[in-house]
Amino acid sequence: DIQMTQSPSSVSASVGDRVTITCRASQGISSWLAWYQQKAGKAPKLLIYSISTLQSGVPSRFSGSGSGTDFTLTISNLQPEDFATYFCQQAHSFPLTFGGGTKVEIK
Amino acid sequence: QVQLVESGGGVVQPGTSLRLSCAASGFTFSTYTMYWIRQAPGKGLEWVASISYDGIYKYYADSVRDRFTISRDNSKNTLYLQMNSLRAEDTAVHYCAKALLVGATGAFDIWGQGTMLTVSS
């Protein structure tokens, strides 16, 4: 199974900050990497797929990068609505697996 | 609009069975791989099962294999998850989700609102 290790598990930031979340796969996953945002009591929302492709309707302050086993989600100019938990996910092979999540909290 | 609506959750005793349903609308259901994903209270996301667009290929997490069965009825635009021999550790919000791309496994672009399953004596 491919393990997805996300860090940090939580981060405190202020509106306007730049936040970076990393995700490391236990083996190469090519471009099969997606990022989701989840707010309390809600279903996750797809933000980015194929490492860096922004899902329709997602603000451009969200961006993804990386290759091989190391990937990054960056939120530039953090907005109040961005305080949430973020998960990475690999779709390279079954079982499909998620990172443990990163909670972005208000400083 | 594109929508998934789950139903069938509830409170059940260990060892019993339950079937979840997921009604799809707003897209051509029969062309997309579909998924069940769950989230235990306060925990992360766990992929449970996948089914190909035609229902032929099915994949399961080790934690549910031989207990859960994923199926679909493309004539009814509905996805199912038959859950047998339920355990306390199956307690979670169960989401159905749609594949982003036609005929492919990958990211999940549409999620239902989730249905809560509680397994407790």
Image (cartoon, grey):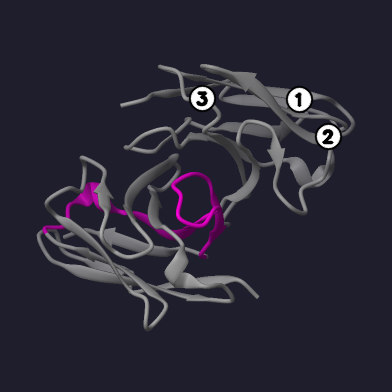
Q: Residue at x 46, y 66 (%)?
A: B31
B115, A105: nearer the viewer = B115
Instruction: Left or right? Give the position of A60 relative to A72.
Output: right
Give the residue type at disc 2: Leu
Which residue matches tag 2? A78
Vertical placement of A32 versus A20: above or below? Answer: below
Counting from the top left corner in percent of width and height, residue A30 is at 51, 25
Q: Secondary structure at mark 1?
A: strand
Indicate the quadrant containing the N terminus of chain A: top left, top right, bottom left or bottom right. Answer: top left
State which region is magenta.
Answer: B85-112
Q: Which mark is residue A19?
A: 1
Binning the other alpha carbons within 10 Å of mark 1 as few (below 14), some (14 to 19) or many (20 upward) gives some
Callouts 1 and 2 close, C-beta under 8 Å? yes
Q: Which mark is residue A64?
A: none
Q: Between disc 3 and disc 2, whose residue precedes?
A: 3
Counting from the top left corner in percent of width and height, residue A3 is at 39, 24
Q: Residue at x 83, y 36 (%)?
A: A61
Callouts 3 and 2 close, C-beta under 8 Å? no
Q: Is residue A6 magenta?
A: no
Q: Secondary structure at mark 3?
A: loop
Q: Residue at x 56, y 24 (%)?
A: A9
Q: Residue at x 37, y 34 (%)?
A: A93
Q: Which mark is residue A30?
A: 3
Q: Between disc 1 and disc 2, whose residue precedes?
A: 1
